[in-house]
Image (tube, grey):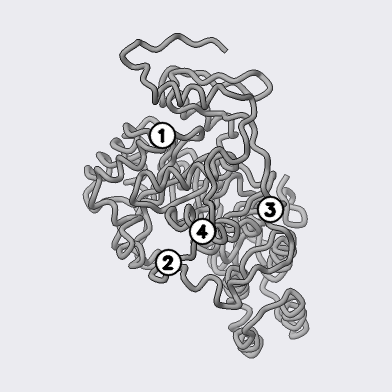
Amino acid sequence: MNFKPLPVPLFSLHCFHRLNRYFSAATPPLMDFPLAKTPTQIPTDSPYSNLAEEPDNLIGSDHNQDETRQEPECPLYAPDMGTSCLDSSARCLTGVSRVERAWAYWTKLGRPKYLVAPMVDNSELPFRMLCRKYGAQAAYTPMLHSRIFTETEKYRKEEFTTCKEDRPLFVQFCANDPDTLLDAARRVEADCDYVDINLGCPQRIARRGNYGAFLMDNLPLVKSLVEKLALDLQVPVSCKIRIFPNLEDTLNYARMLEEAGCSLLAVHGRTRDEKDGKKFRADWEAIKAVKNAVKIPVLANGNIRHMDDVRDCLEETGVEGVMSAETLLENPALFAGFQTAEWVTGSEVASVDGNLDQADLLVEYLKLCEKYPVPWRMIRSHVHKLLGDWFSLQPHIREDLNQQSRLTFEFLYDMVDRLRDTGTRIPLYLKDKETSSAVNGQTY
């Protein structure tokens, strides 16, 4: 590989280290970072301090979690290089500008349009794989706490799992310290396509922890987080943000992130104070304005209930892709064109039973959990989200579930059979014109 020597004043020891790290080997080791010598305990003041205490935090299988770790390919992105070019076997990316590299990278990933949004305790590996089966083209991990991720081996193993088929993948961290964030990011860069910074969480726990949307009050810190990753990672950095009440503030924010090194921007079209998605509509016009204000790829988040919304959002905002969160929890087959009865009633377009229902999806999810173990609290949450309408018709079965201090797969499969034995079935629907393009829950 040929490259022009850097001017002498710029060729510092730090630059040499980074160049040496990038060119040293065709395939870097799986973990290009020092592991902690001894696992530390999760701090007692952390929201994760009870992870090991509750039965629902136990892993839902005895499978070896390390089986899901994959050997990395050659790095596809060198953010500190004017030109990034690998041999043909590793796919070659060229470009003299950061923006060109961002677009080249996004194109190499296939320009995914349908994405699983990051959801705490809900966008874990089995659920991501279920959504991918039904049309999702990329996915985010749940938000990971960067400090705990660097300090606690147990947290890393239980909260972040992936597999070869789990790509493209965004690994999302919350953080307020650049060095800690970089430490965490380096532990996953070999297993993902983007490291994402959570700049949009509006919950009280984010206020207490000084991360997420509450960093909007400290933009110099936000800039330093992005710059740190953009300078020192071998994969690009992305950011997920909320909008400011004032549009111009939002546009300046987006431009600042782009200039700091953000290669992809996901915009949730609600402000920090607009937490209730049912009460506050996402502002697609603001998302469109961000898309027009920056040169990097932009994703939209908000107001996605079915595929009509997906198409409308792409058309109205001009973004590269659309992500969904809450709707996917109830209907992981959203991106395959399936919709719940709530959105069929009153529709001008005829819909038909798609020969798929949420109990079917739950059984598929449980089988994926047996293959890719996750804590039981995540499984329990998905059971309630998927079968909420079913439980409203059969509340005694829900009560039986709630009384289980320790869940088992046997109990959950039996619970689904009991629901079916009552005659309960709430189908998912397809628009009549889409029936021919969806067979057994898969799109073609």
- Residue at image mark 2: 43
Q: Residue at x 42, y 25 (%)?
A: 80
Alpha carbons under labels 1 and 3: distance apart: 28 Å
Cβ atoms under marks 1 and 4 closer than 8 Å: no
Alpha carbons under labels 1 and 2: distance apart: 29 Å
Image: 102 above or below 64: above
Q: Which callout, 1 or 4, points at the residue further toward the start of the chain?
A: 4
- Residue at image mark 4: 152
Q: Position of residue 325 (x, y in %)?
A: 50, 58
Cβ atoms under marks 3 and 2 closer than 8 Å: no
Considering depth in this image, is 75 or 118 the residue closer to the camera? Answer: 75
Residue type (three-letter) at the residue carrying disc 4:
Thr
Q: Nearer the viewer, mark 3 or mark 2?
A: 2
Tell me the element at label 1: helix
Residue 130, located in which quarter of the rendered image? bottom right
Q: Which callout, 1 or 3, points at the residue further toward the start of the chain?
A: 3
Q: Position of residue 99 (x, y in %)?
A: 41, 26
Q: Which callout, 4 or 2, points at the residue further toward the start of the chain?
A: 2
Residue type (three-letter) at the residue carrying disc 3:
Asp
Side (left or right) of 184 relative to 375: left
Q: Residue at x 53, y 62 (%)?
A: 327
Disc 1: CA contacts within 10 A as few (<14), some (14-19) or many (>=20):
many
Q: Residue at x 70, y 71 (%)?
A: 359
Q: Nearer the viewer, mark 1 or mark 4?
A: 4
Residue type (three-letter) at the residue carrying disc 2:
Pro
Residue type (three-letter) at the residue carrying disc 1:
Ala
Alpha carbons under labels 1 and 4: distance apart: 25 Å
- Residue at image mark 3: 66
Q: Nearer the viewer, mark 1 or mark 3?
A: 3
- Residue at image mark 1: 230
